[in-house]
Amino acid sequence: MPQPLVLPCCVEAPPAYAPKACYAIRALLRGLGAEPRWVDRAYLMGPALYYGPEPAAVAGPHTVAVRLDEATPAFFASEEPYAAESVRWIEREGERYPLLFGDVGEEDLIASAFFWLSGWQEHTGPARDVHGRFPYEASLQALWGTACDPAVDVYRVILGERLARAGFVAIPTRWAGRNWAFCATHDVDYLRKWRPGIVFREMVEYPILNRRGVGPAERWARLQASVRQAATGRDPFRAALGRMVDVVLAHRGRATYFFKAGAHGPHDVAYSLKGSFIQTFFARLRREGFEIGLHPSYHAHDHLGLMREERDRLAAATAVRPASVRQHYLRHEAARTPALQLDAGFELDSTLGFSVHEGFRHATCHPFTQFDIAANTELPLWEIPLCMMEAALFNRRGLCVDEAVAVSRRLIYTCRRFGGVCVMLWHNTLWDEVEFPGWGRHFTDTLDAAVEAEGCLTSLHMALDAYR
C-alpha cells in the first residue's frame, strides 16, 4: 500500500471535544489514503482542512473549512440521546443519508461521523436485549430505515470531493489490486450436530411432544429426514467446515474462522481443540492461508480471565496466536469489551453488527479504530464491522433463499461503491438441509456475487493489513 498523504488539519474546539473531532477526522481521511498533520490555523497552506467556529477566517481556494457550531460540543458533553427530529438529510444519487449535525450546505461531517463511529447512540441509549446487546430496534437506523446506508462513507465521499477541489487527490485503499474487499467469516459454535441434546430434540421433542407446533405429516417427514441424516454417520456440521474452505478456495479467496475455546454457561457448547479431526482441520487452514481467530465464550465479553484463558487455549491448539476476535452472540459492551480485548492482545474485532438485521451498525463499511468514550480517547483496536449474519436473514427476518441472496447482493454493491470491506458471517451449519434448508446455496451464491463484483476475497487480518 502507498504511504498515506499528509494533510495539514487545524481543529479549534473545546478541550473535551477536540479528541472526538481529531478521531473522526483521522477516520475519514484514512479512507482517502491520507493522515492528518495537526497545525495551527496560521500554517494552513496548500490543500488543508479547518474545523472550528470561524471558517470565514481561513477561507481560501486551498482550505476546506467545516464549521463547528457551539451547540455541538455541548451536545456531546451532555451525553443526552440524539433527538431524532433534529436530523437533516443529504440527497445523493437519488438516495437520502442522515446528517446529524450542521445543515445542508453547511454540513458538519466530522461531528456526524464521530457520532456513528464511536457508537454514541449505544452509549446514551439504555435499551439492551436479553443478551445484554444494544438492540437493532432501538437504533436510529431502524427508526429511519437506513441500516444498509453507510452514512459515514457518504460523509467521506463529500469531504473527498471538497478536498479534491482544494487540490488534494485521494489515494483509496487497494486490496490485491481490487477496489474493495469481501471477507467471509465463520463462527464455529459447534463441531458436531449429533450431540445428545439434538438427538433427544429430533427423536422426542419434535415428533412426539411437538415442540414446533406443526402437523403430523410435517413431524413425520422431519423425523424421517433426521434419521436418514444420522444414519449416514457423516455429521453435517463437520462436513460443512471443510466444504466452506473448498468453496472459498474455488472462488480464489481466503476467509476467517472463529473457534470456541471455552464453555461457561448454557449458551456455550463445549468442544475439544485437541482431537484429530480438528487438529487436521487447523493444519489445513494454516496451509491454505486462512485466518484463525477466537470466538470467546458467552460470558467472556466482560471477563478478562476468561478472555485470556481461551486465547491461550486456542493459541496452544493451533500454534498461532489469534489476532482477531468476534464475541459469541455478538455480545459487546463498549465500556468494557474493547479494553478486555486489548488486554488479551487482540488487534482486530469484528463483532459490531446487528444480531437481527443486516446493515452497518456504525454507519460504515470501512475499518475503523474504536473509541473509549469514558476516557475520551481513540483505542488501538481495529473494528472491521460485520454487515450480515445468515441467521439474522433466515431466522429473525424470515427471508427465503432468493430474498436473502438479494440482500447480500445489495450489501456487496454498497461496499463496492464505497470502496470498503464487506464482512459476512456463516456458521458451519450450511448444507444441513434438514434444519437449515437453502443456507448453503445462500453462501455459494453470495460468493459468486462477490466475485462478479470484482472484490478481493480475503481474511479479516489481510484486509486490515492493506488498509492501515
Image: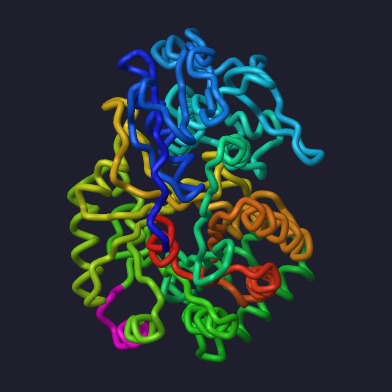
Reply above or below: 457 against 87: below
Q: Is residue 376 left or right of residue 354?
A: left
Q: x, y (%) of residue 325? A: 35, 57
Residue 430 appears at what percent x and percent y? 59, 73
- Taking depth in this image into account, of 408 and 327 the one nearest to the observer is 408
Res 68 visible: yes
Residue 278, magenta (yes or no): yes
Q: How is the image coloured?
A: rainbow
Of residues 264 and 226, which is closer to you in this image? 264
Residue at the image point whose x is 51% and y is 11% from the top: 69
Check if residue 371 falls in the magenta segment: no
Q: Quadrant of residue 27?
A: top left
Q: Residue at x 46, y 42 (%)?
A: 29
Q: Residue at x 48, y 75 (%)?
A: 254
Q: Which residues are drawn in magenta?
A: 272-281
Q: Is residue 69 above or below residue 450?
A: above
Which quarter of the figure has residue 407?
bottom right
Specify whether residue 434 is in view.
no
The image quadrant where one finds the C terminus is: bottom left
The percent coordinates of residue 102 (x first, y second) are 60, 18
| Residue at 51% across, 73% down | 199
